[in-house]
Amino acid sequence: MSSRIEDYALIGDCEAAALVSKDGSIDWLCWPRFDSGACFAALLGDSNNGHWRIAPAAAGERANARVRRRYQRNTLILETEFTIADGSASAVLIDFMPLREGRAWSQLVRLVVGMRGTVPMRTELIVRFGYGGWVPWVTRSETGDLLAIAGPDMLLLRTPVELRGEGLTTVGDFTVAAGQRVAFVLAYVPSHLPLPELVDAEDALRSTEEFWRSWASGCRWCIEPHAEIVTRSLITLKALTYAPTGGIIAAPTTSLPERLGGPRNWDYRFCWLRDATLTLLALMNSGYFDEARAFRAWLLRAAAGSPADIQIMYGVAGERWPDEREVPWLSGYENSKPVRVGNAAANQLQLDVYGEVMDAAHHAHLGGVEGLPAAWDFARELLAHLETVWRAPDEGIWEVRSGRHHFTHSKVMAWVAFDRGIKAVEAFGLDGPVDRWRQIRAEIHDEVCRRGFNRELGSFVQTYDSDLLDASTLLIPQVGFLLPDDPRVQGTVAAIERKLLRGGFVLRYDSAAADDGLPPGEGAFLPCSFWLADAYVLIGRNADAQRLFKRLVGLCNDVGLLSEEYDPGAQRLVGNFPQAFSHIALINTAHNVAAATKPCEQRSGNPARRGFEPAYP
């Protein structure tokens, strides 16, 4: 059985990522890219679907060993310390993935270091390509390295530990005494290529540490007490960035459930346009303009083409991914089925993405991120197409599978698209039919205020003419649609506090009342709770914002990672992990509650408090 979601830590090389449990088991690894098939898939099944454990040898010792882990400061190098039950001996397992630096293969290093006494250790390797479905042919190379091959995939393992086969498992027993260091280097190589030269584990450790610490030093956040958790969130975003293109995936996992045992299980190993503006603000405000430029360039390349064909998500290089299929041989995380690969939401109409693309382009321009050639021509074409479709119903921000509706948030973001086009002309002297755009902007604004606002509830609602609340309406003042002191904004915050708070955290909407095409029940979507804290800042409830932010930061696991959702009843993290959007929200809310430069004010262009400073100092 896999570990609790919060018991995993992330390692990666900015092209692929692995999850390591507290008991020293790598239960999830997709190679050679984030969205490739998994060769270790125990996370969504059991050990027979592939894992790699290194831990104290005897089952009893492993069960009784005390475990403490941490990342080396300002790196993505994980240290797991095992102390045997009587405290007489301990060893540290160091896990990391060196940056590829132009190599055609990816590598994962595990280094066992004796700290005191002597610890008997055991390694257990089960390789299963194709999401746990394919048993490889295991042989030895001429140099004695272990080879596991199936079709196009090959793993190569080098270690001084003597390995042997037991059934379809590779095992090895060894001891590590104080001062000893035992290395394991695992590489993924396309099976048609010659065997590569593997890294030296100690050299790779030094270079990987140097890379991450150098990168982290670029962070200009220095406000305590949240500097460490903000830096950890930024490192997590960097780890989820596909280095060759700059695309940032939503999460490195698929099908971790939004409700344990339920069917709300989706593949998040893709890049969503929806997260664009908040991602750019998080990066630019923290000092990472190179990453912001790379992400903005990815965004415009991915969205390029006919505006009618724009998708809400793309592959890491901008590929279109319409296919969704199930993996029937995986039992699912804690029997949460089905396990899905691919995401059919790529085919949905979601009008808010037009606003996200225009908003991101506008704030990138404000932040000094250079535009791509013909980017404004594309933006004008985008708005020309939006003129013809903004009145249509869509599937909305939450990608419902119950059909199309007139979602309030979607219409607000259509308003944002035209508003940012107008602002671009006014601020940067660009050409555009601003009189027509102003007319459309006013028409959308009027319609949303008439049909998206429920006077009896005193709140904006999920869809036109309904009485269902939706946390996405918390973004209305943040995007500048209404000022924070507008009574309709204040009423929306109050209504969400009354109806959507569970255990102090915010649901996206009431899934028992809303028809989204799936059985009801899910955790609290963590970005929504951060949005509530941001709304508190905008309406002047700073103490409430501070308290909520502190509670949310308290949900981070022992190494500072957040998933997509939190189950207040079970008191567990749920959903895909770690979730980029949750960490983006954490970074932005940290700025909102503690810094002079506030993303919630930057995005709207409406300073909510005296002392507002210009964006991107």
Image (tube, helix red, strand yellow):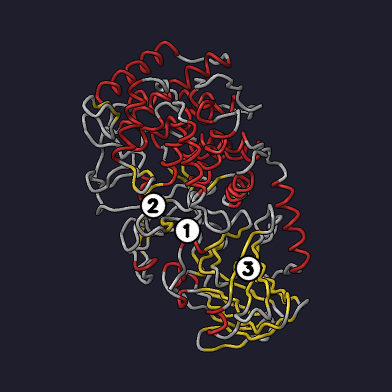
Kindly identify the residue that appears in the image at 59 percent across and 28 percent down. 597
Vertical arrangement, residue 4 with respect to residue 212, above or below: below
Q: Do the residues labelled 3 and 2 touch (CB within 8 Å)?
A: no
Q: Is residue 350 above or below residue 609?
A: below
Image quadrant in which you'd find residue 11: bottom right
Residue 244 appears in the picture as rendered = no
Q: Is residue 571 above or below residue 220?
A: below
Query: Which quarter of the picture shows residue 261?
Result: bottom left
Q: Mark 3 points at which residue?
A: 80
Residue 465 numbered mark, or none: none
CA distance for labels 1 and 3: 22 Å
| Quadrant location of the C terminus in the rendered image | top right
Reading the image, the residue beneath label 2 is 343
First in sequence, mark 3 or 2: give its number. Answer: 3
Q: Name the residue under label 1.
A: 253
Check disc 2 and give the amino acid type: Asn
Q: Which residue occupies the foreground of this view, 403 or 315?
A: 403
Q: Give the quarter of the figure containing the N terminus.
A: bottom left
Give the label, 2 or 1, closer to the camera.
1
Disc 3 to disc 2, how far (Cα)? 34 Å
> Could you say where residue 523 lies in the image, as x and y percent from the top left?
36, 52
* 3 or 2: mark nearer the eye: 3
Which residue is drawn at the image coordinates 67% and 76% (left, top)?
90
